[in-house]
Amino acid sequence: MSENNPYDSLRQVSEMWEKSLNGLLFQSLNNNPLIQITKVGIQANSRFIELLKRNRELMANYMNLPTKNDVANAVKQTIQAEEKIDILKSKSGIYKKALL
């Protein structure tokens, strides 16, 4: 590469940034108190999310509203019914041809 190529200097700067950020990331991952604090926060958030899910289900049942699972089950049943209708239509076409 030539001395006047600006991309060489850009590449060198980006490599320096990459090395420094990788070092910083490695140091933060080896930081045991940080991991412990993160673990506690994740546990608290997961409990809170589960509580919200349960409350949402209870409110939906109380207000007689369909939940996400109810809608998913209805869609599955609709798809199954459409498939059965298609099978019946193809069978009725075969029977019509046999009668003619």
Image (cartoon, helix red, strand yellow):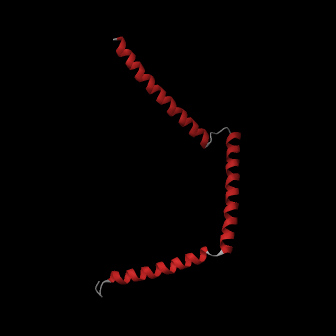
Most extreme residue toward the bottom is: 3
Above or below, comparing residue 69 to residue 5 in the picture: above
Above or below, comparing residue 76 to residue 15 in the picture: above
Please give the name of the residue rendered at 29% of the width and 87% of the height, measured from the top-left corner: 4
| The N terminus, quarter of image | bottom left
Please give the name of the residue rendered at 62% of the width and 75% of the height, measured from the top-left corner: 30
Closest to the observer, 19 or 61 = 19
Residue 42 in the image, given as x and y percentages of width and height: 66, 62
Residue 31 figure quarter? bottom right
Closest to the observer, 98 or 76 = 98
Above or below, comparing residue 77 to residue 22 in the picture: above
Closest to the observer, 66 or 19 = 19
| The C terminus, quarter of image | top left
Residue 66 in the image, given as x and y percentages of width and height: 62, 39
Residue 26 in the image, given as x and y percentages of width and height: 56, 76
Above or below, comparing residue 91 to residue 37 in the picture: above
Residue 54 in the image, given as x and y percentages of width and height: 70, 48
